[in-house]
Amino acid sequence: MPAGDMYSMIIMPVAMIAIFYFILIRPQRKKDKLVKEMLSQLVVGDKIITIGGIHGKITSIKDDDLVLETGSAQDKSYIKICRWAVREVVKPFEG
């Protein structure tokens, strides 16, 4: 077996692993880091959207549980959700 064939047999799997890392794994880790940071910075008053599409304003936070105020001024309702169910912050609390 020539030495050139041996090197190509080693280089191809290493190249494939490197490609998978830079195309799939690394971007997902960056996204996960941003989501984790966003969830840790939630405060009372933030307007959010849940992964189920519910829009609301955070009225209280206790550990990993959030209470959201949903509905209009005349028809308010409150629901309790888990922190991980928040998809995005629409308007951060300023104050």
Image: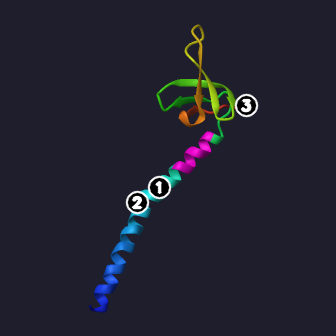
What separation in Å lies between label 2 and label 1 (alpha carbons)?
7 Å
**Residue extending farthest left:** 1
Task: Tell me what residue is drawn at x 59 percent, y 45 percent.
Answer: 36
Residue position for label 3: 95
What separation in Å lies between label 1 and label 3 (alpha carbons)?
33 Å
Q: Quadrant of the C terminus?
A: top right
Secondary structure category for the residue under label 1: helix
Q: Residues within 10 Å of mark 3 (few under 14, many from 20)?
A: few
Q: Position of residue 46 (x, y in %)?
A: 63, 30
Give 46 or 64, whichever is nearer the viewer.
64
What separation in Å lies between label 3 and label 2 (alpha carbons)?
40 Å
67 vs 12, left or right, is right
Q: Amino acid at mark 1?
A: Pro
Q: Give me the disc on residue 23.
A: 2
Q: Position of residue 72 (x, y in %)?
A: 56, 13
Secondary structure category for the residue under label 3: loop
Q: Position of residue 40 (x, y in %)?
A: 65, 41
> Dots 2 and 1: beta carbons under 8 Å?
yes
Residue position for label 1: 27
Q: Amino acid at mark 3?
A: Gly
Tell me where the magenta segment starts and ends, as one range. Answer: 32-39
